[in-house]
Amino acid sequence: MKLNRIIFGVPLAILIIVIGAGCRKSQFNINQNINSPTDSTVTYDVVLPAALHASGTIIAGNWGPIQNWMGFWARSGTYAPNVIEETYEITTGFGNGIWNGCYDNNYDYQIVQSKASQAGAGFYEGIARIMKAHNFQILVDVYGNVPYSQALKGGANPTPAYDKGLDIYKDLFRQIDTGILLIRRAVVTSTNSNKNIATNDILFGANKTKWVRFANTLKLRMLIHAYAEAGINKANEIAVINSTLDTAAGNAFYGYLQAGEDAQVQPGYAADKPNPFYNQYISNIQGTQTANNVYYRANEWGIDYYSYNGDPRRSRFYVAGSGGYVGVAYGLPPITDNASPVLAGIGPGVGKTNTAPQCILSAAESYFLQAEARWRNIITSGSSVAALTNTGIAESFRYIGAGDPSGYISGNAGYSDVDVTALANTPASAPGTQPVGGLFTIISQKWFALNGVNTLEVWTDYRRLGYNEVVTSSSVNDRFVYGAGVGYDPGPPISVSPQNTSTKIPVRYLYPQTEYNYNSSNVAAEGTIDRYTKIFWDKN
């Protein structure tokens, strides 16, 4: 076994606006119906911090089922089975919070964009365009084709048509470009329309360089998702990132999020207005363990994989229960031995504290995206695949507080889930014919790093990659398989629920029932959709 080889800055008034009353649109007197928002007298500078906080809340919540599917968490034995989730027989009522949250959030950004444009507040408008793109990327990656070009028009079009996911991605690149240009050209004074942006921008504090790097990283994420899609010219898009978009704004090459540059919202979280992940999955404002913290415990397959690698991050992603660092098989019927207090729970590296900022996109993910782009020759110069991958590992250790990764990296030399230059030890087929670690390492390390941080990206990796692309001698021609290339049990684990007859994890969510109720003709035009209908970038 491998284990043996290793041994505050926001004024109170703004804070209340941002996180008081759950930051719902109702506090701005905006209609809750996502197809009929009502404009009001609110201004773009008031809406922006609340919208950014809401973006953080979307990333913090909604992903519990995918955490389970990807082998990180599982239902504890304290709770009865969740049959819909654990049999993968998802319905039109499953996971609607993602759809509702992203569209609701984008209506806020649309208000910011429109009103800032009218006022000539380019910094605000640029942020709104980039963050709208971030939400639409999530929607496409979860649901496929969604309302886009006709969306966000309120009463002018309460039943928007659906756009193709590919077309949405292609337009998002241009929207991000426009957002970057607006931010780079923005002039900020104490009296002009961009005033107070440093306070109201609770993501980067009006740091133009970080905004451009975040936007470029978002574009790179989309390029990596669509690496097999011929309809997107990767070389051209990278050329746009590498080029000077506006000579008047300077000639600096911004690149991507760098070491220590996690994109995190921080409106001034406090004990009574806590970080959204902490509030949902750790402890509430009264200091009481949340129901989600009792429900979600360590997945046996996942926590044991960290143990198998002698990975110091185990004690940061998980906290020991009375039984130690033990998990439960996903979907197992409730038994006393698997009661919540016995099992390991969500750890301090991801739960952090109630005052911690909420991560939207981590520097670790940025480096793993760059590593894959370098491996695929989408990025053709600069740091090597190995250097980028190891920096991604180091950034993961930094983000969750796991210390120095050098012992972990050296102790796993020769194992291709850690060592990007290694041959896989125990191939799925044809021993000894595997390529070097390469892409297998990058994708495996994203799994290790993004536990509870960005599980959507892990699920997307699993869906977009055929295992026989990563391990060319493998006879497995379906989804990516974690662990198998280094002698660990193949994963992610399929639910062991007695009611489950499926051997495949869903590759998308279904459209919400509200769409069938209120936008029926347009959603019907998408044809028959089930949990195995592929997103456009899924070529498996």
Image (tube, rainbow, N blue to C red):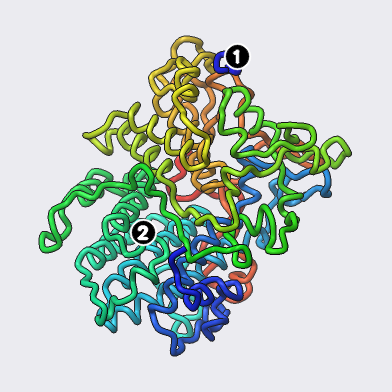
Q: Is residue 485 visible to us here? A: yes
* Three-letter residue code for mark 1: Asn
Position of residue 480 measured from the top left corner of the image (x, y, whole percent) = 52, 32
Position of residue 228 measured from the top left corner of the image (x, y, whole percent) = 37, 40
* Quarter of the image where one finds residue 349: top right
Disc number at residue 167? Answer: 2
Q: Quadrant of the N terminus?
A: top right
Q: Residue at x 27, y 32 (%)?
A: 383
Position of residue 96 measured from the top left corner of the image (x, y, whole percent) = 62, 63
Residue that label 1 marks:
4
View extreme (left): residue: 247
Q: In the rendered image of this protein, does residue 464 appear above or below residue 158?
A: above
Q: Is residue 58 left or right of residue 517?
A: left
Q: Is residue 539 left or right of residue 296?
A: left
Q: Is residue 343 left or right of residue 193?
A: right
* Quarter of the image where one finds residue 347: top right
Q: Is residue 228 visible to us here? A: no
In contact (CB < 8 Å): disc 1 and disc 2: no
